[in-house]
Image: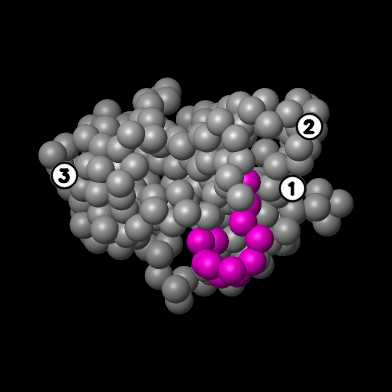
Amino acid sequence: MSVRFDASRRAPGPEMMDDPAVDSAILRACYEDLAGVTTLTLGRRPVLDFVARAARAVPGRRLVVRDLGCGDGDMLRALHAHARRRGLDLALEGVDRSPVAIDAARAATPPEVGIAFHVGDALAEGGPRPDLIVTSLVAHHLADEEVVALLRGMERRARLGFLVNDLRRSRLAFHGFRAMATLLGRHPFVRHDGPLSIARGFVEADWRRYAKAAGLADVLTVERRFPFRLVVERLRTELVP
């Protein structure tokens, strides 16, 4: 299916990786390809920077960090390595609705790393609340009203703050990804889903509208990060009960 780019609005339609019946071997291959793309596009940096700043806000405390929609755990493994280099004390959790994703995360993560992975809803009521919730490349899979619900849920559940790290809708990114994915021989699913993800991405005005609808316009910040990311952040000055 051909994906068309419209700068004025988010593209409709599900991605191939969203199919719950997708073969687990294909999904794992896509995760590996996407990790390479994330490295090339500096896509982990916003999360690493946010967690480091949050840790400085509450010195001497172990922070519980939950990755919502963790996929195969790539971001959490990077965060674990970053924490070791920086001397940050973190307890890391990955939650995803997909059992296939969690199986892939457990298979790719050495047990000694100590990351806890769970199938389920990262914003479900009950149970301990994390200090921080981070989510990367999840929001663009959601409809607008679901993005608003996501913001409300993270505000309700995170004790210190949360970060949404997602794609900026850009014609240059759309065509650039197509060229890069073809040149580097990425998986066919990735070559299809990557441009669609960008077309389903966001501009700053989208996030301002979502923040207003969620009642968070006064506390959220929206920032561009090189090359084609938008980062939505909420960081309190202290932990809430």
Residue at x 81% of width, y 49% of height: 113
Category of crowding for the residue at label 1, using alpha-carbon neighbours closer than 10 angstroms: few (below 14), some (14–19), many (at least 20): some
Q: Quadrant of residue 228?
A: top left
Considering depth in this image, is 185 or 30 the residue closer to the camera?
30
Exactly how many numbered labels are in the figure?
Answer: 3
The magenta segment: 119-132
> Can residue 20 be seen in this snapshot?
yes
Q: Amino acid at mark 3?
A: Arg
Considering depth in this image, is 173 or 214 the residue closer to the camera?
214
Residue topped by disc 3: 9
Residue 216 image position (x, y, % from top left): 34, 42
* Secondary element type, mark 2: loop
Residue topped by disc 1: 91
Q: Amino acid at mark 2?
A: Gly
Instruction: State the residue lying farthest toward the front.
Output: 241
In magenta segment, residue 69: no
What label does residue 60 carry, if any?
A: 2
